[in-house]
Image: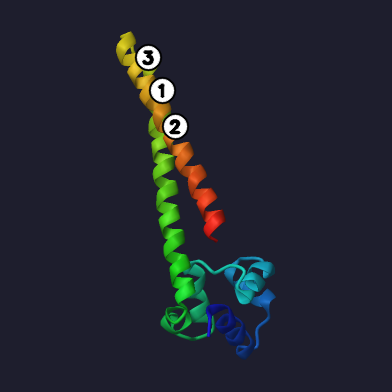
Amino acid sequence: MNISDKLKNNRKQAGLTQEEIAQTLHVSRQTISNWETGRSIPDIYSLVELSNIYDISLDHLVKEDIIMMNELKKENKEKKIINRAIILSAVGVILMIISSFIKSSHIQDFSRGFGMGLLLTSAIVLILTKVLRGIYK
């Protein structure tokens, strides 16, 4: 049984509505519906809360669903890539700002060029991450 079916079955067994679960988790009813139909999956914090609400082990809720585990791993990798790209962008911006205060034209040109390179690289990484996510979803 996959996680969407488990979520729906456990909610019904607990005698709760999607709206009640949504209020408890501070999400929309549509989010609960999406989880129960398999259109999206809950984040790890929501999974922990759901296992508490339904009084089932997190292991039982998640471990058997290989598709979900793979999706969580993929999301984690994407978040790491995006965070690194944001850091590269910040360093690039800082280098470009610093370059405007440097008096030596050679160092100024290098800092500006390196900063611009970091910005472009991070933009490409972010775009590729989004494009590949769309292709492989």
**Kind of residue at badge 3:** Phe
Q: Earlier in the sequence, mark 3 or mark 2?
A: 3
SS for dot 3: loop
**Kind of residue at badge 1:** Met
Residue wearing tag 3: 101
Whether pointer 1 and pointer 2 mark residues with C-beta atoms closer than 8 Å, the reply is yes
Residue wearing tag 1: 96
SS for dot 2: helix
Q: Position of residue 120 (x, y in %)?
A: 45, 32
Within 10 Å of disc 3 (Cα), the crowding (few <14, some 14-19, many 20+) is few
Whether pointer 3 and pointer 2 mark residues with C-beta atoms closer than 8 Å, the reply is no
Q: Nearer the viewer, mark 3 or mark 1?
A: 1
User: What's the CA distance linking mark 3 and mark 2?
Assistant: 19 Å
Q: Is residue 56 above or below residue 118?
A: below
**Kind of residue at badge 2:** Leu
Q: Earlier in the sequence, mark 1 or mark 2?
A: 1
Residue wearing tag 2: 119
Front one among 55 and 107: 107
Q: Is residue 122 above or below residue 16?
A: above
Within 10 Å of disc 1 (Cα), the crowding (few <14, some 14-19, many 20+) is many
Q: Nearer the viewer, mark 3 or mark 2?
A: 2
Q: Position of residue 44 (x, y in %)?
A: 46, 68
Front one among 96 and 119: 119
Q: Earlier in the sequence, mark 3 or mark 1?
A: 1
SS for dot 1: helix
